[in-house]
Amino acid sequence: MGSVPQASSVTPVVGRDAELERLSGVLERARRGEARAVLLAGDAGVGKTRVLDEAGKRAAAAGMTVVAGHCVDLGDVGLPYLPFTEILGVLAADERFSAALAAHPVVERLLGAGTDAVRDVDARLRLFEGIAGLLADVAEVAPLLLVLEDLHWADQSSRDLLRFLLGRGVLRHRLAVFASYRADDLHRRHPLRPLLAELVRLPAVERLELRPLADSDVDRLVRALEQRPLPDATVRRIVERAEGNAFYAEELLAATDTGAGGVPSGLADVLLIRFEQLSDTAQQVLRTAAVAGRRVEHDLLREAVGLPEEALESALREAVGRQLLVAGDDDTYSFRHALAREAVYADLLPGERSRLHGAFARLLAGRGRRAESAAERAHHYRESHDLAEALAASLEAADHAQRVGAPAEEQRHLEAALDLWPAVGAEARPSGRGADRVTLTLRASAAAAHAGELHRAVSLARSALAELGQDADSELAARVRYTLAGNLLSVDSLTAAFAYSSEALAMIPEEPASVTWVWAAATHAMAARHIGRHETALRVARRALSVAEELGVTDAQADLLISLAVFDGGGRRGPEGRERLLRARELAQSSGNAAVELRALFNLAMGCYENGEPAECLPWLTEGLDRARRAGLLSSPYPLEMRYLRLLVLYALGRWDECVRAARADAEVLPAAGGYTVGPALYVALARGDLAAADRARALLEGPFDWMATLVAGIVLTDAAALRRDPEEAVRRMRSTVAALTDEAGTRPDVTVRLAALALSAVADAAVGLRLTGDESGARRWADTATELVESARAVAGRGQNDTPQGPEGQAWLARAEAEWIRAKSGPDAAAWSAAVEAFTYGDVHERARCRLRYAEALVAAGRREEAAEEARAVRETADRLGAVPLRERVDALVRRARLSDAPPAGDRAGVLTAREQDVLRLLALGRSNRQIGEELFISGKTASVHVSNILAKLGASSRGEAVAVAYREGLIAPEPSAS
């Protein structure tokens, strides 16, 4: 077959589906005799070689001869025709082409006699014509793909030969040419530029640019390259720094275990090569620009570098021409890649770095203290060691971030100010209300909570508590304690939260009424509720609501109404709770307190969900997330809960593609949100047969305890174990997850019911299997485990909010758990599974289908075959619509095992098969495997397997051979003479 490019055989191809589809189309046309050439452009490291490697494999799999030639950077002493010499050497070693080589003896000059004999014009023309003729003859033997890599390094002779081949008719044969070059190496005077301009005007030549990968694709690449699960923070940092460059991502990943900061040394060397080729003046300009940051204004750069305008422009032109800087439309310059800027910055001497930072700080200050420049000034002052100015600028930047609704930036600037605080003398610190260390720390804690950094919020609140002196103002001391209590509630440290809220409430008297007491009481009511002190919670909340109404503190009224709606009477599911929530929403809106308004909207949505009305949640969630976006609070706790609930609703309603798209969008906006933004997408992935979802779920458990990440991982890993029929692992995962999520009052989480039902599936499978083999003792052991699990599910399902039974979702999972328990104890029971199917009609499409499959199995066991076939048809339709491959495979297995023929009449079958299924059926008749079918139709083997399963089901066949026989018998396909 020749030499398929193998430069990156272990690196997976991600994010290049469109490009590979386009190249595959060119290959298909070449095999038909419509030859074309593709010039593949892209920056160094973006993945050109990997794409050509994959395209070459596809070409070889389709029967093409693939030969590759590589251009090499040999400076001014380049070897003429080097890539073509490599190509001809491969062709000469292939016996199939010996006759073609013999017919063109002039080509042997490149293979043996060197290039001395081809210096005169006539000899050169004969050589070019000989190579063109040889390639045409080779393409007659087998379709041919020529791959030329790194064309930017090609010698003049190779460029001339390529011009001749593409312009003089070689593309009339069964031949394709793929040639790659680095777009970022093509400075204005690069010798390849004129050739490219000439070639792209040819009708048979097209240009394809490989742009940087999307962040989501770099994320997939990094996780695919690393065998072990990686923490999300590590992956996110690599994705941010790689900026779509696959090579940079690989290098950054390789450096994750070294502990080295900055740019890995090997990558820095690569990045600095082009920088070191610049003139001294251009290097000086780039060093100054690197201190400014990724982007710098022309005027600011001119003042900082101190060069005459003419010299500066010449240096900038050189840097832009060498693709190190990019000129913007707004009179700015940016580094082409952030890592290049980091490498240049790291190469600065310490004194040089400090001097330049000082210059930029003074220049920015001289332009007036604009709020939007405060962050830049703070950075430059800090790096130039002017700490008093850095402190003032940091506080100014924090105020600006608060005004524009950017809590993460506000937190960062406040923490920078707190770090600087002890290094700045008291006389140089800012003065005024709130300008003390405790208040600033408390403010930083609130910003961290709004930014979703809940553990950091707790840490900062603890720091504020430690800073309080003995003579601290009692109201400030109470604020610190109830803030700490609220933060502890958000990380499920419930007993500690109750202790601090109790202290806060005791520090300030109820009379005279004060706003501080109201908020302390509101926090204490929530803490009391969470540790099971319901009477205390209700008494304090009702009294605090009365005081808030007396004082006219509308946002506190709203917050207390929400608390009472959640844990008083029928809870948020009842009409009284809903009325309270609607009133709370109005009060929060009128007060402008976005955080409380978001809490109201979340609870309105949850009330709908708990009532078994998932679709009714979506308007509240849409409103809530829009409000969070406008307030800059997307990362705060309630919007995160709303994101998860929205994805869960889409999953339950069977809108899986929409769920996955929304999860991907959420993860790009909030990559640190973990289980909140990826959970239901992992449920979809697992339900569609992607067992790697379990690895991604396992990675969620790394780092500090995260309640939602633990819940999501528990669901995915328990279900994955059940799908693998591993009862020990399923039960272990269920128990460990419930234990981790059980609160300090000993209350098990609501998800216990779902986890128990999932684990019971594997347990019942084990018990049924052992019973079939006659191992009654083993079956009884698993039946005992099933009893333990179902009792746990019963206890939790009977105790929902306010000690009332769980809503329709919890009752549906309990019905499934009960049916699995009966199956483990005595075998499938149609009535129990019918009840489970009915229970899931509230809206969980996939779980209802899974229960219908079990119901069909029970009907088969009861001899009710027609009903079983009807249920199987319904399951199959749902599985196909959702793309739920495991469910589809299981229902197909039941249909074959029980011989449930639900095929349509013979005359209707041709119309039932889709066009793609007819293609697959034709290849089945030729004896192709799933992998071979996938290769011929350019689909994955897994997709081919799904199509084969669909065909078997539609034809009522139990095997591939039977399907082919039915197809021949009924005229769905015609015998082909070439079939083996």
Image: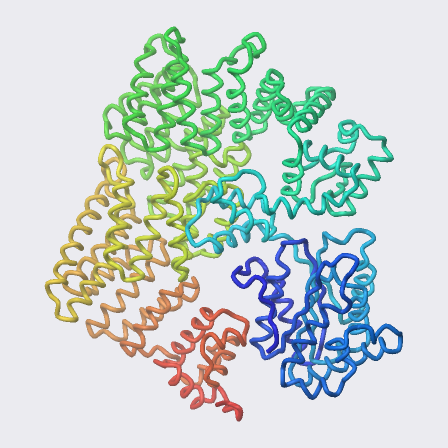
Residue 21 point in image, percent of width and height: 61, 67
Left or right: 628, with 70 as reference point: left
For the N terminus, the quadrant is bottom right
The picture places residue 711, in percent across and down from the top left corner, at: 34, 45
Q: In the image as oriented, which residue stretches furthest toward the left?
A: 777
Residue 102 visible in the current orientation:
yes
In the image, is residue 734 above or below residue 869?
above
Coloring applied to the structure: rainbow
In this view, which residue lies farthest toward the right?
121
**Between residues 662 and 391, which one lies in front from this camera angle?**
391
Q: At 19% from the left edge and 64% from the top edge, which residue is drawn?
A: 829
Query: Which residue: 25% across, 30% down?
Result: 531
Residue 670 placement, left or right of 796: right
- Please, is residue 412 above or below residue 844 in the view? above
Question: Which residue occupies the extreme bottom position in the image?
Answer: 977
Picture layout, residue 728 above or below residue 804: below
Look at 47% across and 74% down and name the residue there. Answer: 931
Q: Splitting the image into 4 quarters, where does residue 373 fall?
A: top right
Horizontal side of 16 relative to 586 (left or right) equals right
Number of numbered discs visible in the structure rendering: 0
Residue 304 in the image: x percent, y percent?
75, 27
Q: Position of residue 322 (x, y in %)?
A: 76, 47
Residue at 55%, 72% in the rendered image: 938
Residue 372 appears anywhere in the view: no
